[in-house]
Amino acid sequence: MTTEYPRYLAAVALPVLSFIGIGLNITPLILHAKNRNIPAVSLISWYLLLNLFNIINALTWPTDDLESRWDGTGLCDIQVKMQVGALFAVPGALVGIFRGLAFVLDTSCATLIPGKTQRWRSHIMDLIFCIALPIVAMVLHVVWQKDRYLLYSISGCVINLDESWVSFALCFIWPPIICFVAAYYCCLILIRLRKYRSEFGMILHSSQSNLNKSRFFRLLLLGLGLLVCILPVEIFTFYLDLKGSLPWHPYSWAQLHGPGWPTITKVPTHGEVFFDRWSPPGAAFVIFGFFGFSHDATKIYRTMLWALGFGCFLPPTDSSNSTTLIGTTPSRAKLMFWKGKSSARTETKSSDGSDSQPSQSGIVDSSDRASSQSSPTTTPVKSWFPRWLLFNCRANCHNENTLLEDLPAAGNTVYTNAWAGTSVSRAGEEFESGSTPSPPVNKNFIHVKQVICQQSEFQI
């Protein structure tokens, strides 16, 4: 790089933002792939590809010194084809997203269990808008391709279209039309939401889809946000293409693909970048904003950190409180900051001279008594950070797959009983562990028994 050809700010900002956008969209891509959401996966994949092209182009042609650099043979031939496909694929993916959400709220076609034919019909429509139309557009690109491609600084490979009615009919008229189809389905969703707002939860639950309320509204707001941005851009691009192609000349295949067709035109831009090159990183940040902070996304982040070896520094969590690793976040927080109350035990002497350790609720746990008599009293850790580090390394590193069933037997158990009948009168009773209450005299009753067990906590 010389002073004659300086590196402009856009040549640095564009690849940096595109690289960050690729990293942020990996997790949403995994989430939608697990849910088998074809339109959302297609949308994110195309934006990932366009961001990758931004990085390659800005690093390969960062300055206006295009004559001394590579002419992009092979790479640009692929890029211009994929760019044509993206013109159709991005609005087509929005159509698929809105169509799927509108179908969920369609009560006239709702079924208890969707049949195989119905599911395949939905998948085929998604594949048509997300894959088939872009492939057809890439194949027909050779019909209206004026030159091999244009080479701009920073922006890289650019499509060049023929100034004839063929380009209008096969290319730049269809993206706005597809966007208007997406807008139609979006309005249909809003109408149905207003119509079925009181039964929305029941309709969504009976749709037999992978959507809950959170995913539904995240997809709806994501598609609506992208549509509000893409539709004006497509209309403006259509206006520029139509204005630049007029007046149309008669179409001729021989003249279009004559001896001058392989010519590569190089254009210095003096730091200017095509406005559509900023759309992929902007869309990547929008997608991450809607799906990068969800509960499912945090699980993927934890899995990635475990795979990278940073699991020892993660607090164990279990939002469902039912399975997997021991403990929950609130209990870990108590053990972290409750230094003097949870770790230090107060020893008292009973009347017969034996040691006793009263619990917080006034009931002595047999398992805690046995463990306290067999092991000496330990000195509590003074600082919370060594306590947190010691606990996480023991709980996560040495025995990361410890299940709840591997813990000691339950310490505190509460038994409750309830009866329902025509005339039942019972006095208050206290039930010990393992005791069976006697049923009421009346035979017309419903007996409900509930057992609540609390697992013992490790004391460190």
Image (cartoon, rainbow, N blue to C red):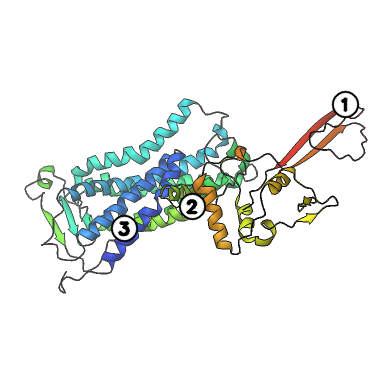
What is the x, y in percent for residue 13?
Answer: 31, 65
Mark in the foreground, 1 or 3: 1
Q: Residue at x 42, y 34 (%)?
A: 123
Q: CA distance from mark 1 to mark 3?
A: 75 Å
Q: Is residue 340 left or right of residue 114?
A: right
Give, as a three-letter code, the residue at label 2: Cys
Mark closer to the chain start, 2 or 1:
2
* Residue at (16% x, 74% y) in the render: 3
The residue tagged 2 is: 312
Q: Residue flagged by tag 3: what amino acid is it?
A: Asp
Report how many numbered discs are placed on residues in the image: 3
Residue 46 place in picture, x, y as percent = 34, 47
Categorize mark 2 by other alpha carbons within 10 Å: few (<14), some (14-19), many (20+): many
Q: Tell me which amino acid carries mark 1.
A: Asn
Residue at image x 27%, y 49%? 83
Q: In this figure, which residue is indicated by the disc labeled 3?
A: 276
Image x and y of residue 416, in percent: 80, 38
Camera-nearest residue between 451 and 109: 451
